[in-house]
């Protein structure tokens, strides 16, 4: 189908969202489930598309780099905890282990997807704040272990060890997960041109985009029908 200017612009926007090609802003905050220097953190998108949500939406997330600050209390344009962000498939700086950039491991992608789906085994999604905070600490240890963020042995943590075993089994079995990062991506935080922490996000197209695609398809069908009618000779 040949596209007009409005349709071309809309399709370009969709492709840009899917690729995570734009730099926008997100507000990062800690909360009752934040365990030390790691997750859970709350990411609230101020402008643009943060993977899981558009402006005004928020989601829970974890850190990829153990040696990088989030710099809560700082901010851009005088706004506390506000960061520019970019989306990609790799941590920008690489942290303690890995290259620069440092691609997400399949195990990390699996565990974060299970967490975001609310299906991560033994995670206290509906427990007390203390129970959920303890599980957040365990999950952060597992994620940092998978990302080679410990120079020595990671902290002894039975639940982290169990999740690491679960992730290894899932990655080894393609019918469960496989060697893929799925829809998981990196949300890299920036302030004043300085690179801060890399967080995890998920990038399915939001419902508004699917609605837009449906509308676009409807416009195309309507145009085809109008052209067909115009070409039909009068009896």
Image (tube, rainbow, N blue to C red):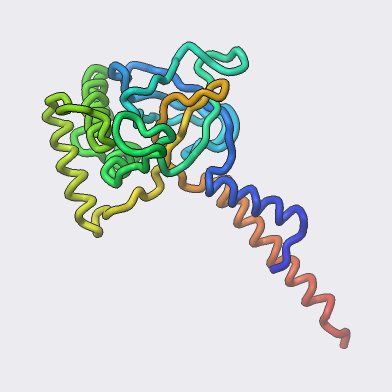
Vertical position of residue 117 compared to residue 179: above or below: above
Q: Quadrant of the N terminus?
A: bottom right
Which residue appears at 48% of the width and 26% of the height?
195
Which residue appears at 23% of the width and 51% of the height?
171
Vertical position of residue 101 compared to residue 14: above or below: above
Which residue appears at 42% of the width and 44% of the height?
89
Tell me residue 223's x, y (percent).
75, 67
Foreground of the two, 14 or 185: 185
Tell me residue 70's x, y (percent).
42, 20
The answer to whether 194 appears left or right of 171 in the picture is right
Q: Quadrant of the C terminus?
A: bottom right
The answer to whether 144 appears left or right of 221 in the picture is left
Looking at the image, the residue that sits furthest to the front is 99
Viewer can see residue 222: yes
Tell me residue 67's x, y (percent).
33, 23
Vertical position of residue 98 compared to residue 226: above or below: above
Looking at the image, the residue that sits furthest to the right is 234
Tell me residue 146's x, y (percent).
24, 38
Say which quarter of the image contains residue 141: top left
Viewer can see residue 124: no
């Amino acid at each position: 189908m040949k596209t007009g200017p409005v349709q071309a612009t809309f399709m370009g926007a969709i492709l840009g969202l899917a690729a995570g090609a734009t730099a926008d802003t997100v507000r990062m905050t800690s909360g009752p489930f934040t365990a030390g220097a790691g997750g859970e953190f709350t990411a609230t998108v101020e402008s643009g598309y943060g993977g899981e949500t558009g402006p005004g939406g928020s989601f829970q997330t974890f850190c990829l780099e153990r040696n990088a600050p989030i710099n809560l209390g700082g901010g851009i344009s005088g706004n506390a905890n506000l960061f520019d962000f970019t989306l990609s498939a790799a941590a920008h700086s690489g942290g303690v282990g890995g290259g620069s950039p440092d691609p997400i491991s399949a195990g990390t992608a699996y565990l974060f997807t299970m967490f975001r789906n609310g299906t991560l085994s033994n995670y206290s999604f509906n427990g007390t704040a203390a129970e959920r905070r303890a599980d957040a600490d365990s999950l952060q240890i597992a994620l940092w272990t998978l990302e080679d963020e410990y120079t020595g042995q990671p902290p002894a943590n039975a639940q982290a060890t169990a999740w690491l075993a679960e992730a290894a089994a899932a990655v080894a079995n393609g019918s469960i997960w496989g060697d893929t990062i799925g829809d998981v991506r990196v949300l890299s935080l920036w302030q004043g041109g300085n690179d801060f922490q890399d967080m995890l996000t998920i990038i399915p197209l939001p419902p508004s985009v699917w609605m837009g695609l449906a509308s676009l398809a409807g416009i195309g069908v309507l145009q085809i029908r109008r052209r067909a009618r115009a070409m039909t000779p009068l009896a």
